[in-house]
Amino acid sequence: MKRTMIITVSGILLLFLSAWGQEGVTKNENDSKDKLKIYTTIYPFQYFTERIGGEHISTENIVPPGSDAHSIEMTTKEMVNLAEGDAFIHSFRNRP
């Protein structure tokens, strides 16, 4: 479990560092097009993603408040928005 968390956090940091190093991205804080759009599944992921990315990202949780993350049903429009996002942070259990 600890190893998985270290790998996940390292991957997220690598994602942000590589995104900030891209050339050609304009720096306009008022324009949300310049921010990375990151989708998450549960609030704790959204919370730490916002803390790491700060003003450079925009996060959205795909699970509505009070809902169970295991029983959500996404619309086609939500799936398209998720596919067009810059990152998707989720957790899964790898069972042997």
Image: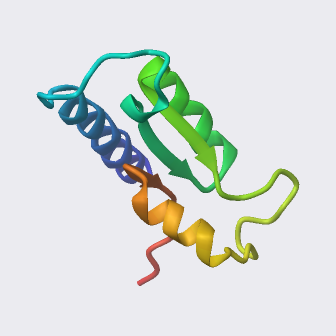
The N terminus, quarter of image = bottom left
Residue 92 visible in this rendered orientation of the protein: no
- Rendered view: 29 above or below 79: above
The C terminus, quarter of image = bottom left
User: What residue sits 22% from the left and 28% below the top?
Assistant: 25
- Rendered view: 29 above or below 23: above
- Position of 55 compared to 43: left or right? left
- Position of 17 compared to 56: left or right? left
- Rendered view: 40 above or below 59: below
Please name whichever residue, 77 or 20, is drawn nearer the observer in this view of the structure: 77
User: What percent of the width, then of the height, locates residue 72?
Assistant: 74, 73
User: What percent of the width, then of the height, locates residue 39?
Assistant: 53, 50
User: What percent of the width, then of the height, locates residue 66?
Assistant: 88, 55
Residue at the limit of the structure toward the bottom, as seen here: 96
Please name whichever residue, 41 or 55, is drawn nearer the observer in this view of the structure: 55
Residue at the limit of the structure toward the left, as seen here: 23
User: What residue sits 37% from the left and 48% below the top?
Assistant: 8
Residue 60 visible in this rendered orientation of the protein: yes
User: What percent of the width, then of the height, locates residue 18?
Assistant: 18, 35
Corner quadrant of residue 20: top left
Corner quadrant of residue 64: bottom right
